[in-house]
Amino acid sequence: MMTIRCAFALAMATMLVASSTSFATESVAPEIAAEAKILYDARCALCHGVTGKGDGVAAAGLSPQPRDLTSAEWQLSVTDEYVETIIKFGGSAVGKSAVMPPNPDIQAKDDVAKALRALVRSFGGH
Ligand code: HEC
């Protein structure tokens, strides 16, 4: 009887923890995470900066400017799906500026898109 109660309490606690976080917690395979980091540094950092602060070498000349992706307020205001969509299909796909380019080679690679999204989330400390 004790064991069943404990198991129930544990399940409830797990559900509470799971529902209190708004970010996906599935793990990304290390090699895909590494691929995403290489992609980010080669492609995205130019505008967004290596740490996502919006201070890439090309950022100054852009209009609109890429925002600070480390902002907790911004992180909470967007869904994982939004982040993955803008990465795959560019700003125009989500009603944002087309200055944010699409990445056609990532469109069929959900795992890479998810890993890039996880990287973007990590800028906000998640
Ligand atoms: C040519 C510069 C450029 C490159 C390269 C670029 N971005 Fe962007 N990105 C932007 C700009 C500018 C915006 C803001 C668009 C707006 O506010 O309308 C943006 C927006 C975003 C947003 C949404 C932020 C928001 O305001 O909601 C995310 C997430 C993002 N980019 C991630 C990435 C990732 C990941 C890559 C690489 C795969 C990348 N970007 C490549 C310029 C760039």
Image: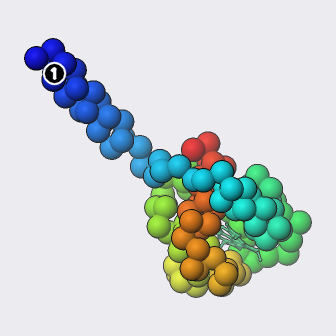
Query: Residue 31 falls in which quadrant of the image?
Result: bottom right
- Furthest toward the left, the residue is 1
Closer to the camera, 17 or 8?
A: 8
Please name the residue shown 79% across and 76% down the image.
62
- Furthest toward the top, the residue is 2
Q: How many marks?
A: 1
Which residue was labeled with disc 1?
5
Closer to the camera, 29 or 53?
A: 29
Q: Residue 35, how many percent across, how many down? A: 72, 62
Q: Is residue 39 visible?
A: yes
Task: Specify the color scheme.
Answer: rainbow
Please name the residue shown 63% across and 76% down the image.
106
Closer to the camera, 37 or 71?
A: 37
Is 54 placed above or below 58 here? Answer: above
- Furthest toward the right, the residue is 57
Q: Residue 43, how many percent across, how many down? A: 79, 71
Where is the N terminus found, in terms of image quarters?
A: top left
Q: Residue 3, how many percent across, how many down? A: 19, 19
Please name the residue shown 50% across and 69% down the image.
82
Query: For the residue labelled by badge 1, is the local secondary structure a helix, a strand or a loop?
Result: helix
Is 52 placed above or below 98 here? Answer: above
Please name the residue shown 66% across and 51% down the image.
30
Task: Mark 1: give few (<14), some (14-19) or many (20+) Cα within 10 Å.
Answer: few
Query: Residue 126 falls in which quadrant of the image?
Result: top right
Looking at the image, in which quadrant does ligand 1 appear?
A: bottom right
Left or right? Give the position of 3 relative to 55. Answer: left
Left or right? Give the position of 38 relative to 85. Answer: right
Q: Is residue 86 visible?
A: no
Left or right? Give the position of 9 relative to 114. Answer: left
What residue type is disc 1 on? Answer: Arg
Is 3 placed above or below 82 here? Answer: above
